Image (cartoon, rainbow, N blue to C red):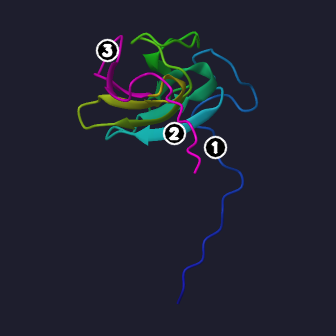
Amino acid sequence: MIPTFQWNSAGITVAGTVGIPGTMANQLYGPMGLALDSSNTLYVADWYNNRVQAWLLGASTGMTVAGDASGTPGSDSNYLNTPADVAVDSNGNIYVADTYNHRVQFWARDASAGTTIAGTGKHIYFQKTYL
């Protein structure tokens, strides 16, 4: 017998406010990559808000754990610029694909700034080669 599955079209919102993008702690704007740690904290790469939000299980608001809580983009070590993805390790450290800063940032647990562990922070243009 082949099991059958049916999508639950009702769904539930576990992070953010339905249909209302913004920079408040209970809002997201362009959520991209997600990660879940061993205590079921959900980490969200909040693309247009230039931050990573952590949502404890059952919480109605998130906490900014990387980037600027107000959504301001930047290239300094305490800012992000359109983060696309996030990963979390067993120690609670997070790794962020910081898209428009062209780098991967490591943020130690409870850190106020990240460290670049991959990328130069600069966009590299390659000229076309013609024969």
Q: Nearer the viewer, residue 104 or 58?
A: 104
Answer left or right for 94 relative to 10. left
Identify residue type, mark 1: Ile
- Which residue is label 2 attached to? 33
Q: Earlier in the sequence, mark 3 or mark 1?
A: 1
Residue 101 in the image: state x and y as whole percent. 49, 22
Label disc, if present, on residue 12 of the rendered structure? 1
Q: Earlier in the sequence, mark 2 or mark 1?
A: 1
Give yes or no for residue 60 being in the magenta stretch.
no
Q: Residue at x 36, y 12 (%)?
A: 113
Identify residue type, mark 3: Ala
Identify residue type, mark 2: Gly
Asked if residue 72 shows in the view, the reply is yes
Mark 3 or 1: the one toward you: 3
Q: Residue at x 35, y 18 (%)?
A: 114
- Residue at mark 3 to residue at mark 1: CA–CA distance: 31 Å
Residue 16 in the image: state x and y as whole percent. 62, 29
Residue 75 in the image: state x and y as whole percent. 47, 13
The 10 Å Cα crowd at callout 3, few under 14, some 14 to 19, many 20 or more, is some
| Residue range (magenta) | 103-131
Residue 108 in the image: state x and y as whole percent. 28, 22
- Which residue is label 3 attached to? 111
Q: In the rendered structure, are the residues bearing label 3 and label 2 in contact, judged by CB atoms less than 8 Å apart?
A: no
Q: In the rendered structure, are the residues bearing label 2 and label 1 in contact, judged by CB atoms less than 8 Å apart?
A: no
- Residue at mark 3 to residue at mark 2: CA–CA distance: 20 Å
